[in-house]
Image (cartoon, helix red, strand yellow):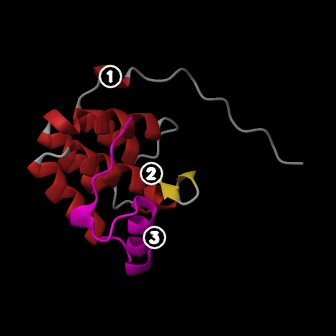
Amino acid sequence: MNPPLPRRGPAPPVEQMDNAELARMVEGEHPYRGKALFELSDRIPYDDDAATKVAMLSRLTSLRQARLFDPVSLAWSAIIALLAAETAHARMSAYEAFGALEPGEQADFLAYLEAPSIEEAHPRLV
């Protein structure tokens, strides 16, 4: 029998936190790191600093291993958010983050997005 998981406290007010605080939550593997990453991702279309931080965070091994659902990791979700923002800075950040993935993971990522190349990937977040 597996021991029970520790109880998480209430979710922190991520919408009130600045980008650096959110990035520290993700880097520190806080129990609500996904919530912090998604808050940063929501800021990408109007905040280049958020885009830069999301791209940097996508390189963390812990995010590359954490699955939202198979095969999508938190790192993939970060890159998808960068692509979906459709700003010049966010797209360049996405290309760099994508370039940091292993070749096999790049191929899987493009297959998931049904795109022949990262430059032709234009996912939409709903």
**Residue drawn at (68%, 35%), measured in percent from left and top?**
6
Instruction: Provide the secondary structure element on which disc 2 rests.
Output: helix
| Residue 105 within the segment the image draws in magenta | yes
Foreground residue among 98 and 107: 107
Task: Using the numbered discs, state the Cα–Cα distance from disc 1 to disc 3 in whole angstroms.
Answer: 32 Å
**Quadrant placement of the C terminus:** top left
Q: Which mark is residue 108?
A: 3
Query: Which residue carries the number 2 mark?
Result: 74
**Residue drawn at (34%, 56%), measured in percent from left and top?**
58
Q: Bounds of the magenta span?
A: 100-126
Residue 113, percent from left and from top: 40, 59
Above or below, comparing residue 10 to residue 77 in the picture: above
Name which of mark 2 and mark 1 comes first in the sequence.
1
Name which of mark 1 and mark 3 comes first in the sequence.
1
Above or below, comparing residue 74 to residue 117 in the picture: above
Q: Is residue 31 left or right of residue 100?
A: right
Q: Residues within 10 Å of mark 2 (few under 14, many from 20)?
A: many
Name which of mark 3 and mark 2 comes first in the sequence.
2
| Residue 119 within the segment the image draws in magenta | yes
Q: Quadrant of residue 51?
A: top left
Name the mark nearer the viewer: 3 or 2.
Answer: 3
Task: Using the numbered discs, state the Cα–Cα distance from disc 3 to disc 2 in whole angstroms.
Answer: 15 Å
**Residue drawn at (37%, 40%), measured in percent from left and top?**
37
Residue 107, percent from left and from top: 41, 74
Residue 15, percent from left and from top: 32, 22
Foreground residue among 115 and 54: 115
The amino acid marked with disc number 3 is: Asp
Q: Is residue 31 left or right of residue 122?
A: right
Instruction: Provide the secondary structure element on which disc 3 rests.
Output: helix
Q: Residue furthest bottom?
A: 103
Name the mark nearer the viewer: 1 or 3.
Answer: 3
